[in-house]
Amino acid sequence: MSEERFDDPNLVINRVYTRTGDGGLTRLVGGQQVAKHALRIESYGTVDELNAHIGQARLECLTLQLLELAAELRRVQHALFNLGSVLATLPQDLHPRQPRVQQTDIDRLEQSIDAHNAGLPPLRSFVLPGGNRANVALHLGRTVCRRAERLVVRLAEEEPVEPCVVPYLNRLSDALFVWSRSAAVLAGDEEVLWSPNDG
């Protein structure tokens, strides 16, 4: 299955502030004005927050010389920006060549999950964040990813959402869990397992 190619960005950003949002409104890609607390804005804002956590996790992986995982996270950052672009656009305004997540992105996550999981010891308890800094950053990303998924599911109950958005976020949260374990194991650090009696 060949991967679809999208248009490169065609924009110039030369002003950071516009003052147009001071009244609590913002504009979608199609120009529609909406409240900054609208569910669509919350959804792509949380995806943006997730992207920042992924960036932090990527840098932590680079520090540990986990280069393959860092490259995977870089790919995810670009995919999340594509996903956010779609969420920032009403379905009727989506351009056919507008970047978006696709089934191939989901397939790639599943392949990575399977490959990393194959090298991990079986779990005998739940895992707590804390194996190393990359492990913690990936767990933070996982929790924000789950929140983004919940918001987009709510949005999809009210408005049409591109079909691959929710499955991508769902699979990404699974990947972040597996990658967090992998980041600890590959670096030679011990995972922190939940022990109910240590609480």
Image: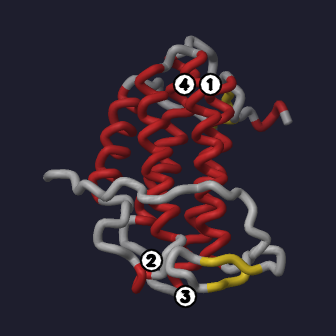
| Element on which disc 3 rests | helix
Between the C-alphas of marks 3 and 4, the distance is: 38 Å
Residue type pointed to by label 1:
Glu
Q: Label for residue 158?
A: 3
Earlier along the polypeptide chain: callout 1 or callout 3?
Answer: 1
Residue type pointed to by label 4:
Ala
Q: Label for residue 60?
A: 1
Nearer the observer, 28 or 43? 28
The residue positioned 55% from the left and 20% from the top of the image is: 62
The residue positioned 29% from the left and 72% from the top of the image is: 96
Q: Which residue is mark 2?
A: 161
Between the C-alphas of marks 3 and 2, the distance is: 9 Å
Dot 3 crowding, Cα within 10 Å, few <14, some 14–19, many 20+: few
Q: Which residue is mark 4?
A: 183
For the C terminus, the quadrant is: top right
Residue type pointed to by label 3:
Glu
Earlier along the polypeptide chain: callout 2 or callout 1?
Answer: 1
The residue positioned 74% from the left and 77% from the top of the image is: 37
Task: Please state the horizontal and vertical placement of residue 6, each as a whole percent of the image.
Answer: 30, 57
Location of residue 196 with respect to 95 vertically, above or below: above
